[in-house]
Amino acid sequence: MSTQRIAFIGLGNMGGPMALNLRKAGHEVAAFDLSAEACQRHADQGLRIAPSAAAAVEGAQVVITMLPASRHVESLFLPQGDAPGLLAALPAGTLVIDSSTIAPASARKVADAATARGLAFLDAPVSGGTAGAAAGTLTFMIGGDAATVERATPVLKQMGANLFHCGDAGAGQATKLCNNMLLAVLMIGTSEALALGNALGLDTKVLSEVMRRSSGGNWALEKYNPMPGVMEAAPASRGYTGGFGTDLMLKDLGLALEAALGANAAVPLGGLARQLYAAHSKAGHGGEDFSSILKLLTGEG
Ligand code: NAD
């Protein structure tokens, strides 16, 4: 594909490797993060760092954001007091892709403001974790119009292996919230079964393998076993470091519940999962990988 001038804002655990993949693919990337440390780390890896978000988007054909939560995305793009917001600085026709996980309502708010300015906007949150971000194998769940999805596809393919057009603006975020709510429930259920097996004196490695190949089989048993020592490559076997933080899962469960409230949808297990993750975070595990929820069930913490 032709070289694009891309502004990338948010160089965290996910955004950093995504921006590096775009540069490796030959695009001209200008990046920015509020954290000087993140900027320096990525400058050391050859990324061009701009002095501000406004400077990064100068001359950009594509703007990509990978920020923590709704408030960061809204305050970057939309007017705040006298400050006009970043959308106002972009020429009509610029493609804007937000890959942060945020509320569907926030995504629609930014999409509406972008459309009113003649910009092309997509919400495109991802799944696949930091390993997927580094390998360029993320799954993108995309909301927006079909023509914009087609235009964005060559760029998204440099960072992801699976692209799903889920519907209009906000549908990518809604899809992501459904997936992560299910993931939380699966992780808690898997942890509960392993904690019970442990209490019954079973070998949890054998139990894990039996359940993986039986009717209890699921993604946590397949790729992300929460019991330390069962799966070498899982965060549980490296002290629950790296991976997907408890507090980020807690944020996503909050977003799922908020969306469910707006739609009058019943999500009893999602609600319980949020309570359990909130208690786990309060007990001091917010920064650990979300599979550490096992500790709540074994009584370790
Ligand atoms: P992170 O906290 O590591 O990175 C976020 C970065 O955004 C930080 O470096 C922060 O300094 C920067 N930032 C915040 N506001 C900014 C602003 N106004 N301008 C410029 N930079 C700003 O988070 P992450 O793990 O990279 O996650 C990013 C998003 O992706 C989140 O919404 C998260 O839920 C989602 N996500 C994460 C994972 C994962 O495994 N970590 C997986 C899928 C989706």
Image (cartoon, grey):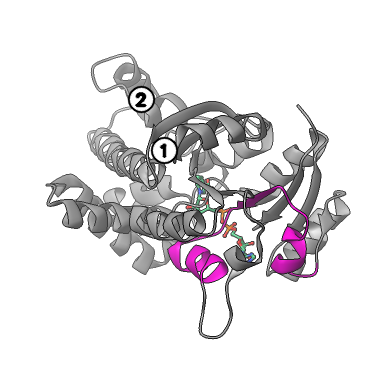
Q: Is residue 139 visible?
A: no
Residue 83 is situated, as x and y percent measured from the top left of the image, at 58, 80
Looking at the rendered structure, the secondary structure element under dot 1 is loop
What residue lies at 48% left-to-right and 58% top-to-bottom? 116
In-front residue for pair 98/43: 98
Task: Read off the magenta span.
Answer: 51-78
Q: Is mark 1 within 8 Å of ligand 1?
A: no
Q: Quadrant of the C terminus?
A: bottom left
Q: Quadrant of residue 143?
A: top left
What residue lies at 51% left-to-right and 69% top-to-bottom? 78
Rendered-image quarter of ligand 1: bottom right
Q: Quadrant of residue 26?
A: top right
Mark 1 closeness class: few <14, some 14–19, many ≥20 residues within 10 Å: many
- Furthest toward the top, the residue is 213
Residue 155 is situated, as x and y percent measured from the top left of the image, at 66, 35
CA gap between label 1 and label 2 equals: 9 Å
In-front residue for pair 219/75: 75
Q: Is residue 19 left or right of residue 198?
A: right
Looking at the rendered structure, the secondary structure element under dot 2 is helix
Residue type, label 1: Met
First in residue order: circle 1 vs circle 2: 2
Mark 2 closeness class: few <14, some 14–19, many ≥20 residues within 10 Å: many
Residue placed under numbered mark 2 in the picture? 208
What residue lies at 51% left-to-right and 85% top-to-bottom? 81
Relative to 236, say whether 250 is above or below: below
Residue placed under numbered mark 1 in the picture? 227
Q: Is residue 155 left or right of residue 146?
A: right
What residue lies at 31% left-to-right and 62% top-to-bottom? 278
Residue 73 is situated, as x and y percent measured from the top left of the image, at 51, 63
Q: Is residue 57 left or right of residue 162?
A: right
